[in-house]
Amino acid sequence: MNYLIRAAVWQISTIITHDGSAPNQIARLSILERLSLLRSEVAFAANVFARTHPGQRTPINVFVAPEYLFGRSQTAHFFEESDKDQILCVLKALSAQYPKMVIVPGTVAWVKPAQRERSILNVFRKDRVERAISRINTGKKWNSTLHDKALTTLGTAKRSEIFLGENSAFILRGGKVLLKYHKMADGGEVNRPTDNTNGRKVIFVPGPRRGAFNVDGLRFGMQICAEHFNNTLAGEQLDVFVLISASFQLRSDAPPVRDGGYMLHADAIIEPTVVRRNGTTNNKIKQESNHIDQPGLVVSRSMSSAGRVNYYSLPLTR
């Protein structure tokens, strides 16, 4: 089957540092302002895609934003759980407006209490700490040092003081979540004093599932920043790989993409990148082309206040 992947890859500075020394173009924006900015970029991408005729190919539209598009500030990562719920609600509504587009809206860094509130509804729910321990043990192979530190805190601190932190990417299409993917390897989310506020001890909890999903017969896979060091997608044969990051390079020897498949990289500071697997080599897409039989860059848009977005027309046959 012949496909045309019409992709928008967004670079905008979202870096979070302990001293706020790195540039961050969205840190001062409220949640609603960030959602509005994302909405405008998705709308623009939809218009670009509509002008790129797929011919006899089946089109798949993809929009990718970098990690920490929804990070709390320039120096701290985590929003509250209620903020995450608000963000996800609006993201679903945005996705419903563009039902044919796969939207990877960066990540949401958020925390929840390790101890559930007492209620009849929570009696039969699995204990959050026990579930966190299980996920931390599973993720030990990705980061053994942080694993030991997390288990020590969970075993010694009061549960009322502990919060569980996650860095989550919600992949959406047609108003629904295709994949709720939690970062599997801690990239430094919880080793800064600013992330442990008001006497809370924040423990990073790695995700329980690999980042692979299907779209119209194609196999997609994704990773978030530091976990790209690790082979979290071992055994997969991907048609499209997505890496979202905050200052991280795309590896030349990973991930497991089939011949003719693509790698899309949206980063906070590195320019938007698309690479095509050709046998055992990877070729960066550079040339400008509107011809559907030749992979190429359709248009690049650079904005001082909103980063840079590249739009690609990528033929793929399976």
Image: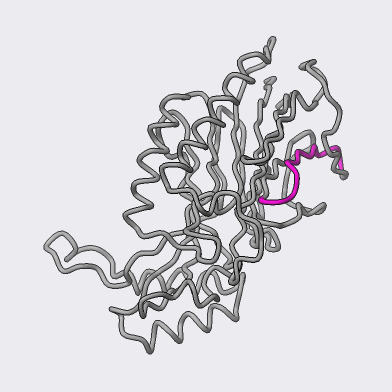
Where is residue 58, by image quadrant? Answer: top right
Residue 197 among those drawn in magenta: no
Residue 78 lies, in percent from the top left, at: 45, 62
Pinpoint residue 66: horizontal percent, then vertical percent: 61, 47
**Point 58% across, 25% down: residue:** 44
What residue is drawn where x is 64% and y is 50%? 13
Q: Could you tell me if residue 239 is visible in this image?
A: no
The x, y position of residue 77, in whole percent, is 50, 63
Is 169 left or right of 53, judged from the image as shown? left
Q: Nearer the viewer, residue 43 or 297?
A: 43
- Which image quarter holds the N terminus? top right
Q: Is residue 291 left or right of residue 15?
A: right
The reply to whether residue 247 is visible in this rendering is yes
In the rendered image of this protein, does residue 165 appear above or below residue 92? below
Tell me where the magenta segment starts and ends, as one range.
268-279
- Figure check: 81 above or below 307: below
Q: Is residue 276 magenta?
A: yes
Report x, y in % for residue 36.
46, 36
- The quarter of the picture where residue 15 lies is bottom right
| Total numbered labels | 0
Say which of 299 and 167 sits in front.
299
Q: Image quarter for residue 48?
A: top right
The residue nearer to you, when weighing 50 against 134, is 50
**246 shown above or below 51:** below
